[in-house]
Amino acid sequence: MKHLRTVEDVMTHAVISVDRGTAFKDIVEQLRMWNISALPVLAQDGQVAGVVSEADLLLKTQGTDTTHDTAAEQLMTRPAVTVTKDATIPTAARLMARRHLKRLPVVDGDGRLAGVVSRGDLLKVFLRPDEDIGAEIRELIMYQLLPQVPTERHVHVHGPVEVHVHVADGIAYLNGSLPDPAMEDIVVRAASTVPGVVDVKADFTAPVSA
């Protein structure tokens, strides 16, 4: 499985949308037909002008009998909460959780609709095989992180570095020998950034002084 790092890697590219003039009943029909809870509303230039959801429609029906005269522009929530396609998966997940959203329109650099991402899409990252996750952790720690630690983190390395990585059900188990205790926190935090990692458990030892 490819590395799933950005929203573009997991989003749905074929998106159902409506324009500002779409009528109430047509919006309801689109939601029902595609079994979704919200639709992006597009301006003429393709930018996302707002989002109309089931909640928006239900609020409009309370105390009114003129739903057939109501268009998306009057119903939608604006400005739309969107995410850029190059945003990281954790960034999108935090935004959805903070705003209590099930789906997010994804936009390109010009604000035009590029796709849509759902909670289920964001969870795809956790389908990565454990072997792939483990291989990426080893590469990250041994070949990218640790060679830079002494100069970037001011950690003085006086002894062998030995890191063993085992991943089971998305949990990364790290053990081995680190010559400086300060390195353990750096290694654990780095491993936790690898897509698909659910948790990191470390058990490192320091070399015995002569």
Image: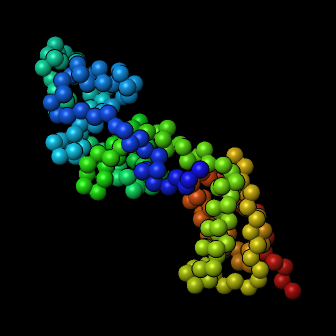
Task: Specify whether residue 79 is in view.
Answer: no
Comparing 4 with 78, the one in front is 4
Q: How is the image coloured?
A: rainbow
x 59%, y 50%: residue:
1
**What residue appears at the point 53 percent right and 42 percent down from the top-left corner?**
123
Q: Is residue 36 left or right of residue 142?
A: left
46 left or right, relative to 134: left
Extreme residue toward the top, this view: 65
Q: Quadrant of residue 36?
A: top left
| Residue 63: % across, % down | 19, 15
Q: Is residue 80 above or below residue 159?
A: above
In the picture shown, does residue 202 fall above or below 113? below
Which quadrant is home to the C terminus? Answer: bottom right
- Which residue is at a point 65% across and 55% down the rendered structure image? 132
Q: Out of 86 and 164, give the one closest to the viewer.
A: 86
Q: Quadrant of residue 174?
A: bottom right
Residue that sits furthest to the right in the current view: 210
Q: Total number of numbered labels? A: 0
Q: Residue at x 68, y 65 (%)?
A: 138
Residue 52 visible? The answer is yes
The location of residue 128, given as percent across then percent down, is 62, 48
Q: Can you give x and y, in whole percent of width and height, for residue 186 in the image?
A: 61, 69
How far across and down, in percent of the image, does residue 80 sit? 26, 43
